[in-house]
Image (tube, rainbow, N blue to C red):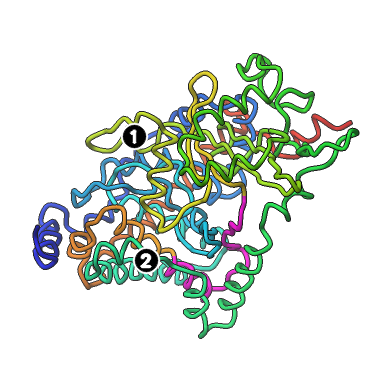
Amino acid sequence: MSSVDDRLKLGKQARKQCPRSSQAAPGKIKRDPLPLIEASSQGRVRSLVELRYGRMLVPPFTFYRGNALLQAHDLSTTPDMGLSSTICGDCHLMNFGGFATPERNLLFSVNDFDEVHPGPWEWDLKRLVASFLIAARDLRHGEAVEEELCRQLVGAYQRSMANCAGESALDIWYDALTYEDLLEQAQSNRATLEHVQRAMDKAERRTHAELLPKISERDARGRLRIRDDLPEIFHLHQNTTLLDADDDWMRLGDWRPLYETLMRDYRGTLQADRRDLLARFKARDLAFKVVGVGSVGTRCLVSLLTDEQERPLFLQFKEARRSVLAGYVRGKSRPSHNGQRVVEGQRLMQSASDLFLGWTTGPNGRHFYVRQLRDMKVSAELETFDAETFGAYARICGRALARAHAKASGQAPLISGYIGKSETLAEALWQYAKAYATQNERDFERFQQACRKGRLQARSEADFAADHLP
């Protein structure tokens, strides 16, 4: 095995075929975004595609969040140092946040892995840097703040990766970014400190017991049921359903056969002790849940289970489709199960993962992964950030991404050797983010025009709710 110094040198040598300044290239952007947007909607619930487009119409940042496929296409022609390892694949700033470990500790890391796939680490970093610039522009922080956010993020990634390069494999594997760490780092800024403390307080309240009265009720016979709340939550086989009449799930007639099919394979993906714990709960109801922006129209179910004391557990079954990276990376891989791809990628990139994380196959062969719904999960409230807090968040995300890449790849010295100690990469990625933010605005305008002219149909939440008024 080569020494750390040897691998640092190999990373430095990679600059010859891929100069760090070349990372400024925006990629394959001379294309029409509409066919790619339409392609990403294939296989989704048809009526919910209209809701997806409605959510993407709001600001350029939401449009950016809903289009990981577009940027994967564009990144496919950009230079990279040649290292392929497991990456997030949809690494924007709202896919970071707080979550609970099985021991109920609150950690901060990447927390969305729908698109996880082997690929160049640079792609994650570029999507993240561009997302900060686009979000800051939407919130009108100004160009000086936009640039500072990009440089702070890349600098934090650079420093964290350099630290990882000197650590043992076990140290990297066990390392975790806790909210106590964030509190300590935020001591010098009162506003940032308040944001971290508020997030911790919010996480402690986001439990299954706290969620129960918000999304459930008792029917006339006193049975617990999930409450319909269109278009966010609806039952599959009632008059509130948003599934198409010819949808294969509609032929099932009831939620129980679907639930039992999903649970059959899922149980086998859990550790024995967690299977035993799950067996102490009984299913009460199952409903469709619309989530996020990019995921709207894919199939997502939430199941309400209770123990003997009627204490709740909410499980989320989320469809796992082919990663948006799959068609664009070199050395294309074909995972046997996309739910397994998501779960194993998450376990590889996070220092700890959900107690009930697993995968399964539904009727007609669709792939799903399973996790708890909402349990102690918190995300950034960007609209409340001042410039200093935004900068602190950029540094935290940069640090968290570097730790995730170091853990997943086992190649921290190689990456660190390539990045080096100067600001060369930060300058290149600042230029990249500016160019890509401009491209995102052009794509957003094309998308708006397509919706106005009727090529794409977009509807809001209010539109869907109005359709089902009593």
CA gap, disc 2 and disc 1: 29 Å
Crowd tier of the residue under label 2, counting other residues whose Cα lies within 10 Å: few below 14, some 14–19, many 20 or above: some
Which of the 4 quarters of the picture holds residue 177? bottom left
User: In this rendering, is residue 440 above or below 384?
Assistant: above
- Percent position (x, y) of residue 273? 50, 46
Residue beneath disc 1: 326
Q: Is residue 404 left or right of residue 100?
A: left
Quadrant location of the C terminus in the rendered image: top right
Quadrant location of the N terminus in the rendered image: bottom left
Answer whether residue 310 is magenta in the image.
Answer: no
Helix or strand or loop: what does disc 1 sit on?
loop
- Percent position (x, y) of residue 142? 51, 68
- At horizontal 42% and vertical 38% (from top left) the residue drawn is 69
Give the magenta-colored segment's residue range: 374-396
Residue beneath disc 2: 175
Crowd tier of the residue under label 1, counting other residues whose Cα lies within 10 Å: few below 14, some 14–19, many 20 or above: many
- The residue lying toward the viewer, choosing from 78 and 271, is 271
Number of numbered discs overlaid on the protein picture: 2
Label 1 is placed on what type of residue? Ala
The mark lying in front, picked from 2 and 1, is 2
- At horizontal 71% and vertical 17% (from top left) the residue drawn is 253
Is disc 2 in contact with disc 1, using a CB cutoff of under 8 Å? no
- At horizontal 53% and vertical 41% (from top left) the residue drawn is 275
Label 2 is placed on what type of residue? Asp
